[in-house]
Image: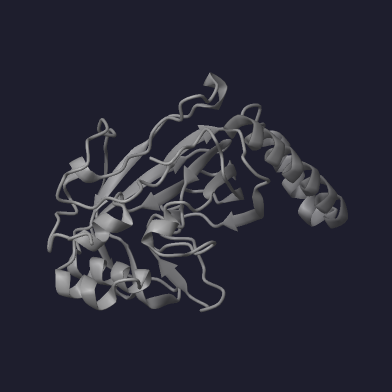
Amino acid sequence: MTIYPSRTDPNDRRIWFWPRPVPGLPVAAQALIDLAICSGVVPARQIGTEKTYSNTAYVPHGTWLSVTPMAPQAPSADVACGFAPRCGVFRLPGFDPQLWLQLSALERDDPERFKLEMAQLSGMLVAVTSRLFDAIEEPVVLGTTADRANELTVTFDNDRASYPGLHLDSWEGGDLDARGRSRTRLCINFGPGDRYLLYVPLTLRQIEACLPEPVTDAWRGDTSQILYEFFRHHHDAPVARLRVEPGCGYIADTDNMVHDGSTMGVAEGNVHFTLLGRYRILPLQ
């Protein structure tokens, strides 16, 4: 049985996982890694907002500072790391923002034609990303979603009619080890504004190791409660912010990493297209 330390420093950057370039992607599909860190979180109920957040929601709070990803480190012998989630950005070759603006205008002017055009675009995006990342299976298409400008977090939980703040997805769910083998999310930003992927740069095993042992013993197996306890104990928990420009997408194992989207500080909203898949070019880390 794994023995977890009673306390691990969540701000030890040597144990963080960082966004990395994807080896094997063509030059035209590479994107700049633009990363910042916010060293703190607060309960969402403490911020001034008209949004309905859940009672357990936490969100980033503080100043964002640009940071350069560290070189890969060997895992510490006294920390059970688990699989490091895949995380990065890519560029969609040949993306034309003007063509997307023309297409999006059809949603208002000619809804039926818009549906046909979107179906064709969806098929094209599946084909392009499957080729770029060497898909192992047919990806799951989650479709398009729109975000407004200047939103601290964007994910809305329809089942609970509230915003969860920093959270885990549960497209596949499972225990901490099973989550390391979940599908990878590819999320392409059509623009016109930038958007951000927010995430806690610690594996779920590391998050568990940051808590006192009695807490992990009490809530082992309950990932939602472990996450809540982590933020409750560590208001200085780090949150990373990865910029995703129009025509680019992020790569993230969102069943296996604490995350959300954001448009805070961005003057324009965006529409993004999301897939879940398994890809040979994105091996387990």
Q: Residue at x 27, y 50 (%)?
A: 81
Residue 259 appears in the figure: no
Location of the C terminus by quadrant is top left
Q: Residue 188's image quarter?
A: top right
Q: Position of residue 30 (x, y in %)?
A: 50, 26
Residue 15 appears in the figure: yes
Q: Does 165 appear above or below 53?
A: above
Q: Does 268 appear above or below 55?
A: above
Q: Position of residue 36 (x, y in %)?
A: 31, 42
Q: Residue 130's image quarter?
A: top right
Q: Residue at x 62, y 56 (%)?
A: 145
Question: Is residue 73 found left or right of 6 in the rendered image?
Answer: right
Could you tell me how many numbered marks the image carries?
A: 0
25 or 190: nearer the viewer = 25
Location of the N terminus by quadrant is bottom left
Q: Residue at x 16, y 47 (%)?
A: 12
Question: Is residue 227 found left or right of 212 in the rendered image?
Answer: right
Q: Does 257 appear above or below 170?
A: above
Q: Position of residue 248 (x, y in %)?
A: 54, 36
